[in-house]
């Protein structure tokens, strides 16, 4: 009880109490579970509230939404529902279930069951903790596998010997939690993990599941340490067989960290996929054919795959252009960089050894890409120019002149355009 009331914001406490009231009335055991409980005990803010109901989770979610004027989205296939309350708080409600595996690495077969069984299918002891929500038992901790002790000793431990065999994605999850929380893999867990890697079971995971794990790993706060750990367990080969831990890679990843920091300081307020930048660095140390193979083998979303076209030779050529002496003029810098997504620009900053080039890229991000001429197509028409291919040409030259500071006012732009008109 104390844990909930002392550590959570009051709207969350009332939400949990409301869930508990409904559970009490419907006579169904109901629990907060998983990462939410783990992080609550660690004092880490986590508003991803997962609820398990010993009964029909979807019916429970619908009843809760009706009573509290919330929205509900049902995922019939998984027996789960997401409830969004009027104040924006969300809860994922699931039917307690057991999973059995027809064969290792298969997707599990799911049947309704008790919370104890539900907790027994989970990955690590620290994720098996649950908090009872029914009013009479509100706030009681359920700890079936020594999860609390493992939280105290900062240990990642599987529940049984076949855990990694049943679901090898847990190999990556283990490393992710270990690094994120600053924990250590327990000894037996480490040797089980090593066995699964050696026995080649990871190859049996679908490419989609594997790719999802890589993205999750690279989306964590400190991918460099994670990748070092992956290298230690010989896991980088699942990204590509030629990918290995090396001082060159470590050096590059440090440069990526610095570039990302630099980008954050620019305050551009533009959402980026940091995992793509790390992925670019990983690909850049590979031969061209290996990059192609990786893109072909793993199910990259099209938009992200396109961003990777700049790794390798493409980026080397761009950097060479920016590194020329004398330093390129702003218009040249703009033309070199204007088609690149921000992730590629951050990657270029990391790859470049030259502070001058890094500054050019920063200037592009903060200034050049926002510069526009004062005149537009309508103004050109009013000045007597006929719309057509020439228009685009004039506007581009005008933009270049503006970027280079050759024109600054409306009348300077008009003079510039008139002169262009006379010469063309
Ligand atoms: P995160 O903060 O990364 O979301 P989380 O613990 O909430 O951490 P999820 O991936 O959202 O992780 O999973 C929710 C819960 O489901 C976990 O706490 C864990 O108990 C369970 N779980 C998820 N994936 C697996 C898996 N592959 N095997 C067993 N249990 C899993």
Image (cartoon, rainbow, N blue to C red):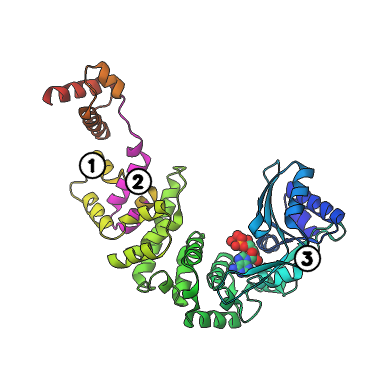
Quadrant that contains the N terminus: bottom right
The disc placed on residue 412 is none
Q: Residues within 10 Å of mark 3 (few under 14, many from 20)?
A: some
Is residue 336 rendered to the left or right of residue 75?
left
Of residue 5 and residue 91, the one placed in the foreground of this image is 91
Residue at the spot of label 3? 141
The answer to whether the residue labelled 2 contacts the one labelled 3, judged by CB atoms less than 8 Å apart, is: no
Q: Label 3 vs label 1: CA separation? A: 63 Å
Residue annotated with mark 1 = 332
Which residue bears the numbered disc 2? 362
Residue 40 higher or lower than 227, as above or below: above
How far across and down, in percent of the image, does residue 53 sit?
A: 76, 60
Residues drawn in magenta: 346-374
Image quarter for ligand 1 equals bottom right
Picture quarter containing residue 244? Answer: bottom left
Magenta stretch: includes residue 349: yes
Classified by dominant secondary structure, the portion drawn in magenta counts as: helix
Badge 2 marks a residue whose secondary structure is helix
């Amino acid at each position: 009880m104390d844990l909930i009331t002392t550590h959570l914001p009051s709207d969350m406490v009332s939400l949990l109490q409301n869930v508990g009231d409904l559970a009490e009335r419907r006579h169904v055991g109901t629990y907060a579970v998983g990462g939410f409980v783990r992080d609550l005990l660690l004092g880490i803010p986590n508003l991803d509230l997962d609820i398990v109901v010993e009964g029909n989770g979807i019916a429970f979610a619908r009843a809760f939404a009706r009573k509290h004027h919330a929205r509900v989205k049902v995922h019939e296939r998984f027996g789960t529902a997401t409830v969004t309350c009027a104040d924006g708080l969300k809860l994922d409600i699931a039917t307690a279930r057991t999973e059995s595996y027809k064969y290792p690495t298969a997707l599990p077969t799911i049947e309704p069951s008790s919370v104890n069984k539900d907790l027994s299918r989970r990955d690590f002891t620290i994720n098996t903790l649950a908090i009872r929500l029914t009013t009479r038992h509100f706030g009681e901790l359920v700890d079936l596998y020594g999860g609390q002790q493992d939280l105290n000793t900062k240990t990642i431990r599987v529940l049984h010997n076949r855990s990694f065999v049943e679901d090898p994605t847990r190999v990556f999850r283990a490393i992710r939690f270990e690094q994120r929380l600053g924990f250590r893999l327990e000894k037996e867990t480490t040797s089980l993990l090593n066995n699964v890697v050696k026995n080649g079971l990871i190859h049996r995971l679908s490419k989609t599941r594997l790719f999802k794990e890589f993205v999750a790993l690279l989306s964590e706060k400190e991918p460099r340490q994670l990748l070092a750990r992956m290298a230690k367990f010989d896991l980088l080969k699942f990204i590509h067989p030629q990918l290995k831990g090396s001082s060159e890679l470590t050096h590059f990843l440090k440069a990526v960290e610095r570039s990302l920091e630099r980008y954050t300081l620019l305050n551009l307020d533009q959402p980026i996929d940091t995992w793509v930048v790390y992925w670019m660095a990983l690909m850049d140390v590979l031969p061209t054919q290996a990059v192609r193979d990786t893109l072909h083998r793993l199910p990259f979303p099209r938009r992200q795959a396109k961003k990777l076209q700049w790794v390798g030779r493409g980026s080397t050529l761009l950097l060479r252009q920016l590194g020329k002496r004398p330093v390129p003029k702003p218009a040249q810098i703009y033309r070199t960089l204007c088609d690149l997504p921000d992730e590629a620009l951050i990657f270029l900053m990391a790859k470049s050894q030259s502070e001058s080039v890094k500054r050019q890229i920063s200037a592009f991000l903060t200034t050049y890409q926002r510069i526009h001429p004062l005149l537009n197509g309508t103004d050109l028409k009013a000045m007597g120019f006929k719309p057509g291919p020439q228009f685009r040409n004039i506007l581009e030259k005008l933009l270049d002149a503006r970027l280079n500071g050759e024109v600054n006012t409306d009348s300077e732009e008009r003079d510039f355009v008139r002169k262009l008109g006379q010469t063309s």
